[in-house]
Image (cartoon, grey):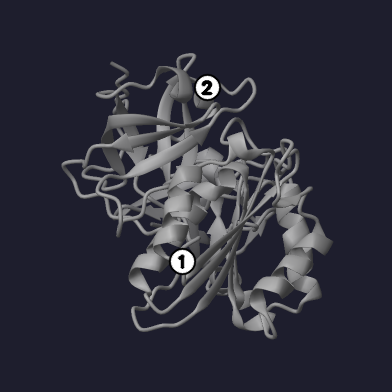
Amino acid sequence: MFSIFKKKDKNKSAGSDRYFKLTVREVRRETADTSTLIFEKPEKPLHYQPGQFLTLILPVEKKEVRRSYSLSSSPFTDAYPAITVKRVEAGKVSNYLNDHMRPGDVFDVMEPAGHFVPALEENDKKRYIMFAAGSGVTPVFSILKAVLTKEPGSTVKFVYQNRNEENIIFNSELQKLEKEYADRLSIIHVLSRPETGWIGKAGRIDAALATQLINELAGSDATDCNYFLCGPAGFMHSVLDAFTALHIPEDKIHKESFYSGEEKPKHEVAVSVVAQAYVVQVQLDGQTYDVEVPPKKTILEAALDQGIDFPFSCQSGLCTACRGKLVAGEVIMEEDEGLTADEKQKGYILNCVSKPKGPGVVVEVG
């Protein structure tokens, strides 16, 4: 049995609700390189929204590592929470999860997080257009199921990019949903390397194809739809370019910056060096910590060095697990991709890529 237990730390907040133990109930193979881990219901209720992710805390080579994986289950349709993990070349964690997980194995995870979630209203009649590529489908699949269940008047049109038919994650489930909700759900598969006989769309989704698809799916008013987007960086940029060309309002666009979960993304940020150390007051789990942040460290790095049980995952400004609200002072934040415009306006920062600009910085976390 694979069991992971957190090491106790003198600064770990007593009674923190951020951690759960999850036991694997079932391992389901989705494709040759992708598996879904279905968990038992934990003793402490695991409340999550469709589109959120879990951060797994794993010991790798005697060092604690954290990896974030989107919940592919929906709280409204699935009895048990689940994550879906695609194998990554030379990926220590994704390969282990695909090769060695068995029912009964136990994980430590952080509470569900993320803001890639729909605003669902039972009486709404919205039009959704969703784009995903590869394993970027995992949060979109959760959202899609939630919309079909909780907004009976809404419709969903889903564009899904893959290499070939064998690589389509959730293929059979998507087919079942399309039949069950034939009047509300339509799916367009785009394959970059289709096998002989494929009669669907072929090629990679670039800005031109994305624009064409949106025009076909949205009809006369593309600005009236709600868009959800998740996938690799190149795919994301292409679809976002199409949104720009079609003048889609920013508040209609919901995107998840997606990466493999193995190591940090290629665009790992280098935070500007500040001339001197400053003390940052961190308010976390009802306690206050004075964290001295040296010139070459971020607020998160300094807090972890001090032994503070600070929530984090990607450490690259994407996942928002380390998000905090700037109560006082100023910071330099090198990457804000994970924050929405509304969050930035309200003063939220990502501590993994932020440094104090001067004295008097106060950050409220959680």
Q: Residue at x 68, y 85 (%)?
A: 221
Question: In the image, which disc is placed on residue 95?
Answer: 2
| Front: mark 1 or 2 | 1
Residue 129 to residue 269: above or below: below
- Front in this rendered view, residue 126 or 321: 126
Q: Position of residue 115 (x, y in %)?
A: 48, 61
Residue 40: x and y, percent?
Answer: 23, 37
Q: Please name whichever residue, 260 or 33, is drawn nearer the observer in this view of the structure.
A: 33
Residue 364: horizontal and vertical position, in percent? 43, 60
Q: Please name the amino acid that badge 2 sits on.
A: Asn
Disc 1 marks which amino acid?
Answer: Ala
Would residue 176 be found to the left or right of residue 81 on screen?
A: right
Q: Earlier in the sequence, mark 1 or mark 2?
A: 2
Residue 160, numbered circle: none
Disc 1 is placed on an element classified as loop
Quick one: 61 or 307, which is closer to the camera?
Answer: 61
Q: Nearer the viewer, residue 328 or 54?
A: 54
Residue, far front: 197
SS type, badge 2: helix
Q: Label 1, label 2: how many angstroms apart (C-alpha)?
A: 36 Å
Q: Can you see residue 275? A: no
